[in-house]
Amino acid sequence: MKHSEAHPTRDTVLIGVFGALWGLMEVTLGVTLKGLRIPMGGALLTAVSAIIFLTGRYFVPRRGSILMMGAVAAILKIFSIGTVIAGPFLAILIEAAMGELLISLLGIHRLSYLLTSVILVLYTIVHPFFSQGLIFGVGIYKIYLETFTRFAEILGIGLHHLLWVALGYAGVHVLLGVLAGWIAFSLPRRVEAEHRQMQSQREGIG
Amino acid sequence: MKRYVFISLGLVALALGMSYRNLVILVPLTFALALLTDLVAIRRIFRWKFVAFLAVLVFGIPLFIGQRNALFLGVPYSPEIFRMSVVMAFRSMAILMAIKIFTAHISVEQMAAALQRVRLKQFSHVFTISMHLLPEIRRITLNTFREYRTSVQGWNIFSQTFDWTVKLIVRLLYFAEQYDANQPGKGE
């Protein structure tokens, strides 16, 4: 057995810690947001998730770390409640895969953190359609399209007007993503500074 | 465990194979398989919200969209959308039953053991550690949250929340380092 398998390395422990924190947040905050029926709850949850895993990725600059954190969080989520929670499980895995891909391609800097958060928060608009497509089949898209067309007919407006509403909604998501990305980039730096300060204080006492 | 994984996969395969023509064969087969496996778990899926959603999908939607060129009790509806909705309803039931059977019979520990067996060793290692650390992470997070709730004052909530998030991550990092340092073979 290799040494890394017998004893966890610092990176493995940190991935485990951030993955568990992400899962814990998904379970507690996720249930609270759903229970309170807060608008854009999914986007808020994704924004907080992005802050957690991007902070984790800063401390574990290793490819695949976000994916592993996401897998831990997804498994915790699917076994957390008695109800069937296929949508959130899938959402966490997709978020992790997208986050991993973007950060691996772009590297760690403010712009990549902003872009990753914005894309992930925007994805929350598409996700229900995607997961419903998996559960109900592609027929659900035809029903959505026909329903939107009929809805526009009843209101006496064109489909492009509904598109403007959707764009406005997406704009709010972009703002939330920018905020999350900004926090996700600033947080690890402050944490690093405080952690260093704490360590030097401890060494001073020692 | 294997039995439930195969039953869940079987249900997903049946769901994916459903079309309006083969519903008469596949739907009874799906329900027989699911009900014989776990009646209690399956009953939990059929909550009123889900049933109401399916009812609207099958009986409501065809009345409003598509080519309404057929009549039922004098009410025009779209047979094409009706057929599509029926398939979607049964497909969703089959997939949700598969997930329910999977999650009702497989625990997190079994999942970790399975990951180890399929040679996803690195992930299985991370997963085992995170399960081991979870109670302490929960305790640290809850304590920090309690401190945060009692200390937040004034209007600068955003800045205070940020400061407390920094504190939480610092505490978790310290805990992770302590855990890592206390591993056998470390610090020798």
Image (cartoon, rainbow, N blue to C red):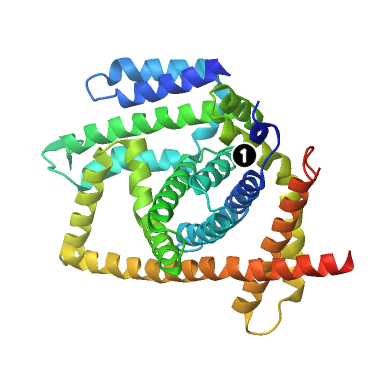
Q: State the quadrant of the N terminus of chain A.
A: top right
Q: Is residue A144 left or right of residue A34?
A: left
**What residue appears at the point 51 percent right and 49 percent down from the top-left corner?**
A66
The residue lying at 25 percent from left, 25 percent from top is B19
Spot the residue most to the bottom.
B154
* Residue drawn 89% across the image and 64% down it: A206
Image coordinates for residue B127, horizontal then vertical, percent: 62, 37
Residue B15 position in % (x across, y down): 35, 25
| Residue A162 shown left or right of residue A60 in the figure | left
Q: Is residue B138 visible?
A: no
Q: Nearer the viewer, residue A176 or B118?
A: B118
Residue B186: in sight, yes or no? Answer: yes
Residue A131 drawn above or below residue B79: below
Q: Which quarter of the figure has residue B166?
A: bottom right
Q: Nearer the viewer, residue A188 or B58?
A: A188
Question: Where is mark 1, residue-wise?
Answer: B126
Quarter of image, res B169: bottom right
Label 1 CA crowd tier, 10 Å (few <14, some 14–19, many 20+): many
Q: Quadrant of residue A114?
A: bottom left
Q: Is residue B182 above or below residue A126?
A: above
User: Is disc 1 placed on a helix, strand or loop?
Assistant: helix
Residue B35 left/right relative to B159: left
